Image: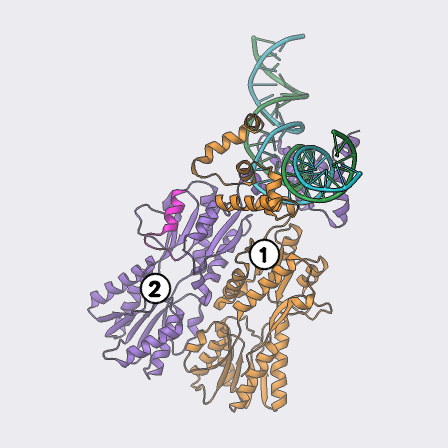
Chain colours: A purple, B orange, C cyan, D green
DNA sequence: GACCATGGTTGTATCGTTATAAATTTGCAT
DNA sequence: ATGCAAATTTATAACGATACAACCATGGTC
């Protein structure tokens, strides 16, 4: 009689199921419910591990679910609960070069592995304001958490997300009074140590190319650089009109001209592989020998620079680890409130 | 009276709406329906542009929708229609280096711009078979289309997706009898021309490092290389025990040893920036001068190598364009059946 | 024996959208 | 007026999951 009853209650469904059942219709809670003779609600609660459901029932349900390879339908869960199970990574078009984004993505996917979270790339197109993708995600509940880079001292995005108490981690810090979650690399120390190394190897005049000064880490780098040159009292200059975002050709040309002029720098703090190669090319074209007339310290994020000849001193930034940390921290934050200090991490340089 | 009626029918909703209405509750079809006095169904059909809805109504609805910034709820649409509006890019862990993935992602996001499609990164972890993420996506309807790389001659993934008539584009070709969608770079021609160039500049013995031979493009490269050396009758060798996937240190060490031995190669076909730098480092460490004792031709995907000194000849592969094409083709395929020839594109080298 | 707390399970409504079928209005010929 | 087809609009049910409240045994207590 119960069989008859079932048939009567869901004639259409049954028929549909049978049709597409040719190659394993996607199992739902209903499948498990039918299989175990329980109600859909019970199955749902059992899988959620609710203590009101008898332990034995929970185990039985879990077993059947595993057996038939049940996975909850994301769309249905999302519609009902409002949780998207999506982490949005906002990718900047400038990040084309040298796998900056890729390393971070690798870290992120590692953090997300084994969780139901998906990583969605939300591009930020350069012809629109930085805040746009964030607003869009917030307004349309497109993600449970956001990760972004290129943080600014008074970053709009940070303000907006803090106001809305929306989970996020940014790469880089702001100068806002309110503390916020971040993962950052110690660019102050990078520039400081790079400058010190150059001075130690006898450079008399240092040069540095900074990131665009809209970004906080540009200030950090400048500060670290300036502290070192002041401590040692050597000459210095900061490249103007170009930045770490400039095309490598433009950077090379800048230094090409600069080296023609009087009292050129002989030590270079290079905030990335691209700028390092561009400056090295300019020096090479002027017949300046690395290790003799000129010296370099470069930040490398890839291990690639270990192969460059002549060898240059490098300092490593682990972007993959940054991504991993950001992912882990964001997941914690999404799970529930976390003291903000626990969502802040500064990647320090290795001891020497 | 109709007002009363409404209140009676949806008392809870109204209340809820009022509560969270403090800061602009997310507009739904219902919002538009209330605003226009139409039924939810009508609004839905109107926005879909159904010809059965009066033109004037369609315009009015469209106007109101734009006014209040309505965007359909992805979860609800997905649940109802089964379409996810997701493109899944399967990312291989080997693709860390030099923005291979990033360029492609940039192209993809450009293709997806203005569409409702989202780009989801599905990692393929190296400790699991290549086909796993594809099976997972297929089984759980996690995307409307798939893009993947590192295609093999008898690629499992291609077979599976063809069988299921599931939209996909892969980067690289198979050797399967059935034609399938792809975007590929002409690696045969790359290796052929690279070898020819080296011979033209006087090299007597060429060497090449191939991709792992599980990948189809490894065969293409080998074939192009072999054709050139046979045509010209010069010596050659193919590096064994290493591949383009090897760590740069290992590649450098390999050639370090090789150059110690007798009759070393004097011309190098480098399938990527990493391998080029590693080989150049090995040569440098042996005092071999580029342009004199040894020559290089490198494939570059980033523009970075234009800065390398001494200069080396490079051949460019545009991965960003590849991503763009793959995105555009995939969208067409998702929209409906397309003759397979129109979903095949071979990126040819620029004429010289 | 009636009553109630407890543990365990179930029914109902709902998230926002769309496919389907039904209902309503309109226009026009009869 | 009357009927009927065409043009519009609407009601209903469903996608698969979960929040909430209600339900039903069971066993102990008075």
Left or right, D14 with respect to A127, comes to right
Vertical order, B274 against B78 (above or below): below
| B201 is within the stretch colored magenta | no
Q: Nearer the viewer, residue B332 or A25?
A: B332
Whether residue A73 is visible, yes or no, is no
Give the SS element for disc 2. loop
**Is A312 on the left or on the right of A38, as rendered?**
left
Query: Residue, x 56% and y 54% (percent of image)?
Result: B117
Q: Using the image as rendered, state which of residue A3 and residue A317 is in the foreground.
A: A3
- In the rendered view, would you say B63 is above or below A198? above
Looking at the image, residue A125 lies above or below residue A200: above
Q: Magenta part of the protein: which range? A: A150-164
Disc 2 designates what residue? A211
Residue B251 in percent (x, y) is at: 51, 75
Give x and y (percent) for residue B287: 42, 86
Residue A88 visible: yes
Residue B13 sits in quarter? top right
- Reply above or below: A210 against B224: above
Binning the other alpha carbons within 10 Å of mark 2 as few (below 14), some (14 to 19) or many (20 upward) gives many
Q: Disc 1 marks which residue? A: B87
Name the chain under label 2.
A
Between residue B332 and residue A15, name the one nearer to us.
B332
The quadrant the N terminus of chain B occupies is top right
Question: In the current view of this chain or complex, which residue is farthest to the left?
Answer: A233
Q: Tell me how far mark 1 sits from mark 2, CA to CA.
A: 33 Å
Residue A315 image offset from top left, x and y in percent? 37, 66
Question: In the rendered structure, does residue A157 fall within the stretch colored magenta?
Answer: yes
Which secondary structure lies at badge 1? Answer: strand
């Amino acid at each position: 009689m119960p069989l008859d009853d079932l048939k009567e209650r869901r004639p259409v469904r049954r028929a549909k199921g049978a049709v597409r059942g040719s190659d394993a219709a996607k199992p739902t809670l209903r499948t498990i419910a039918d299989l175990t003779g329980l109600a859909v609600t019970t199955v749902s609660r059992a899988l959620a591990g609710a203590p009101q459901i008898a332990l034995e029932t929970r185990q039985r349900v879990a077993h059947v679910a595993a057996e038939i390879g049940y996975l909850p339908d994301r769309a249905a869960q999302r519609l009902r609960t409002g949780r998207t199970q999506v982490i949005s990574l906002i990718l900047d078009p400038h990040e084309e070069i040298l796998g900056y984004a890729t390393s971070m993505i690798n870290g992120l996917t590692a953090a997300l592995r084994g969780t139901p979270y998906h990583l969605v790339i939300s591009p930020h197109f350069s012809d629109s304001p930085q805040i746009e993708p964030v607003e869009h995600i917030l307004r349309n509940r497109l993600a449970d958490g956001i990760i972004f880079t290129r943080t600014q001292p008074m970053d709009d995005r940070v303000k907006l997300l803090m106001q809305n108490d929306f989970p996020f981690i940014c790469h880089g810090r702001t100068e806002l009074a309110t503390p916020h979650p971040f993962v950052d690399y110690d660019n102050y120390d990078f520039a400081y140590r790079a400058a010190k190394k150059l001075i130690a190897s006898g450079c008399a005049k240092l040069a540095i190319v900074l990131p665009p000064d809209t970004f906080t880490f540009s200030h950090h780098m400048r500060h670290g650089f300036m502290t070192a040159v002041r401590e040692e009292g050597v000459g210095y200059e900061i490249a103007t009109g170009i930045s770490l975002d400039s095309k490598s050709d433009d950077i090379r040309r800048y230094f090409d001209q600069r080296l023609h002029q009087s009292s050129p720098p002989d030590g270079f703090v290079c905030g990335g592989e691209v700028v390092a190669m561009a400056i090295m090319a300019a020096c090479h074209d002027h017949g300046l020998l690395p290790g003799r007339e000129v010296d370099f310290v470069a930040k490398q994020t890839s291990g690639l620079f270990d192969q460059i000849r002549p060898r240059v001193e490098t300092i490593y930034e682990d972007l993959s680890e940054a991504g991993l940390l950001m992912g882990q921290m964001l997941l914690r934050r999404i799970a529930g409130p976390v003291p903000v200090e626990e969502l802040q991490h500064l990647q320090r340089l290795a001891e020497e």
